[in-house]
Amino acid sequence: MSTKHKRALICGISGQDGAFLADFLLRQGYQVFGTSRDAQVSSFANLVTLGIRSRVSLASMVLTDFRSVLQVLAKSEPDEIYNLAGQSSVGLSFEQPVETLESIATGTLNLLEAVRFLARPIRIYSAGSSECFGDTNGRPADELTPFRPRSPYAVAKATAYWQVANYREAYGLFACTGILFNHESSLRPERFVTRKIIAAASRIAQGSKEKLRLGNLAVQRDWGWAPEYVEAMWQMLQTKEAADYVVATGEANRLEDFCAAAFAEKGLNWQDHVEIDRHLFRPTEIMYGCGNPEKAKNDLGWAARAKMRDVVRKMLAVEQQLPDSKPETGQSGP
């Protein structure tokens, strides 16, 4: 089937990845449907920012309600489903563990069961997370690396991963999980530490006297560019056989390096403007996170083009064009 006649349903379309994926699929000729808990009151600011709000058909869907899921699937008749919904903050998951598990694990189960019930050849992409690996002791994680989740968010994502694998093996569904490492853009809300750093560096360069409060700067992460990562999601559903893939740049950098790069781009020394706040340290912290994307490169032909310093420059370039912002408190991420 030509992509010009395909229909895609994006659950969680209002977030960073949902908006970029919708934009990508529209350019591929898809008819795109998107859901949120309440489409009448939800903010679709990211779709507006990308100039595609009017080209997406939106609907309300509560992923934890099986009947709601079934109704939306029956009405939209998708060829492909991209499940990007659920509570998305690692930090917040420590405060809301029940909501996190229900929105991610129960939501994924309802989608899988609805597709099985409808008995249609619908392909399913489920958003996994590198957080499932926990700390890999300095070794890049691949598809065979054991899960050692260290947050309620990671536990929920690991649960969803095994649900997808079970439905693929037991019921023959074309369902796969993308285990994505950190991927950023200026569509990130400022509660995510990368955007928090970028926004603060931009304001300080323009004369703000604020101090940027950050948590543990020694953590290492594999940071990529979000618009590239949604292409990998799509490519996973175009293969002959469903499989799970790690999506990453293959390079790890310290949060301190990300911070230093952002301030250096503005001609500033980060140490003059940053304060360490012990309250922003997590109860259980992953010190090293890096992915091995070889399988995605070999099977999908996908490889990250932007690395950490490219991501910093891209985010700063967009930040300069945004209206003046005020600093948010707290920190989620890296």
Image: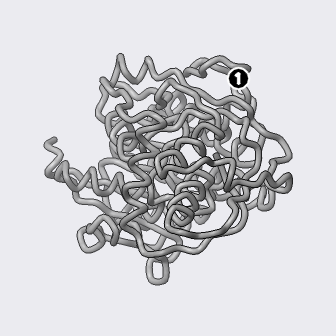
Image quadrant in which you'd find residue 175? top left
Residue 136: x %, y % from top left: 70, 23
Residue 116 in sight from this viewpoint: no
Q: From the viewer's perspective, tell me whether residue 88 is left or right of residue 116.
A: right
Q: Quadrant of the N terminus?
A: top left
Q: Residue at x 49, y 83 (%)?
A: 41
Does 147 sit above or below residue 18?
above
**Total count of labels:** 1
In depth, the one of 241 and 291 nearer the eye is 291
Does 281 sit above or below residue 59?
above
Residue annotated with mark 1: 136
Q: From the viewer's perspective, tell me whether residue 11 is left or right of residue 145.
A: left
Does 152 sit above or below residue 285?
below
Image quadrant in which you'd find residue 260? top right
Residue 334: x %, y % from top left: 64, 45
In depth, the one of 4 and 302 nearer the eye is 302
Q: From the viewer's perspective, tell me whether residue 155 is left or right of residue 67.
A: right
Residue 89: x %, y % from top left: 65, 55
Residue 295: x %, y % from top left: 43, 19
Q: Residue at x 43, y 66 (%)?
A: 35
In depth, the one of 5 and 140 nearer the eye is 140
Q: Amino acid at mark 1?
A: Thr
Q: Residue at x 50, y 28 (%)?
A: 246
